[in-house]
Image (tube, rainbow, N blue to C red):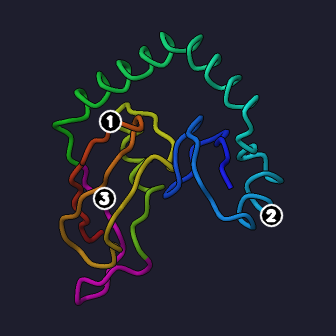
């Protein structure tokens, strides 16, 4: 079954992408949650026309994301966490804490844009990937220290 995504869905696609999904996933989750519509011929024509009309707006969004990525290039973060005597963190560091640290530096981002590949459960240096646009992402190093 082919559907047109109405919003970005991680590990599936971005808004206005036409993707192929299993019938149950499309009918039971994506369509009822209003995250996608069935990719019929008329829906594809409407999407094509909308994309043509929004082309300049999408280009502006991409350039804005690129300028933000250039500003964020040299940033490194330090996050304090409560730890045991062996250096193990009570809990873990997640994307919300990284978003809070970035907001202190003047970058307002949605926490859903921040992806941490490894689980952060010990003191050390890690990397987070920030997806600003479907083609633009920034890798930011962060250090977890003991409070």
Q: Residue at x 23, y 74 (%)?
A: 123
Q: Which of the numbered marks, if any, corresponds to residue 79? A: 3
Q: Secondary structure at mark 1?
A: loop
Q: Does 44 sit left or right of 84 as displayed?
A: right
* Outermost residue toward the right in this view: 32
Q: Position of residue 20 (x, y in %)?
A: 59, 54
| Foreground pick, 57 / 121 | 57
- Few, some or many C-alpha atoms within 10 Å of disc 1 (few <14, some 14-19, many ≥20)? some
Q: Residue at x 25, y 55 (%)?
A: 78
- Few, some or many C-alpha atoms within 10 Å of disc 3 (few <14, some 14-19, many ≥20)? some
Q: How far apart are labels 2 and 1 at the CA level?
A: 32 Å
- For the residues bearing labels 2 and 1, Cβ distance under 8 angstroms: no
Residue 88 lies in magenta, yes or no?
yes
> Relative to residue 10, is residue 138 depicted above or below?
above
| Foreground pick, 97 / 26 | 26
Q: Which residue is mark 1?
A: 136
Q: Tell me the chief SS of the magenta region.
A: strand
Mark 1 or mark 3, earlier in chain:
3
Q: Residue at x 70, y 41 (%)?
A: 39
Query: Nearer the observer, disc 2 or disc 1?
Result: 2
Query: Nearer the observer, disc 2 or disc 3?
Result: 2
> Relative to residue 37, is residue 147 depicted above or below?
below
Q: Which of the numbered marks, if any, corresponds to residue 28? A: 2
Query: Where, quadrant-wise, is the C terminus in this rendering?
Result: bottom left
Mark 2 or mark 3, earlier in chain:
2
> Relative to residue 109, is residue 119 depicted above or below?
below
Q: How far apart are labels 2 and 3 at the CA level?
A: 40 Å
Q: Secondary structure at mark 2?
A: helix
Q: Secondary structure at mark 3?
A: strand
Magenta residues, as a range? 77-91
Q: Position of residue 99 (x, y in %)?
A: 43, 47
């Amino acid at each position: 079954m082919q559907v047109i995504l109405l919003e970005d869905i991680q590990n599936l696609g971005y808004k206005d992408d036409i993707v192929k999904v299993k019938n149950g996933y499309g009918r039971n989750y994506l369509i009822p949650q209003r995250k996608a519509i069935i990719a019929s011929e008329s829906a594809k024509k409407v999407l094509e026309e909308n994309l043509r009309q929004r082309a300049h707006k999408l280009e502006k969004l991409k350039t804005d994301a690129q300028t933000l990525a250039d500003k964020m290039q040299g940033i490194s973060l330090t996050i304090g966490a409560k730890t045991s005597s062996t250096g193990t963190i009570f809990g873990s560091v997640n994307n919300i804490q990284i978003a809070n640290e970035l907001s202190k530096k003047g970058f307002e981002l949605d926490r859903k844009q921040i992806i941490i590949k490894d689980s952060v459960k010990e003191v050390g240096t890690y990397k987070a990937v920030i997806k600003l646009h479907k083609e633009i992402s920034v890798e930011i190093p962060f250090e977890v220290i003991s409070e």
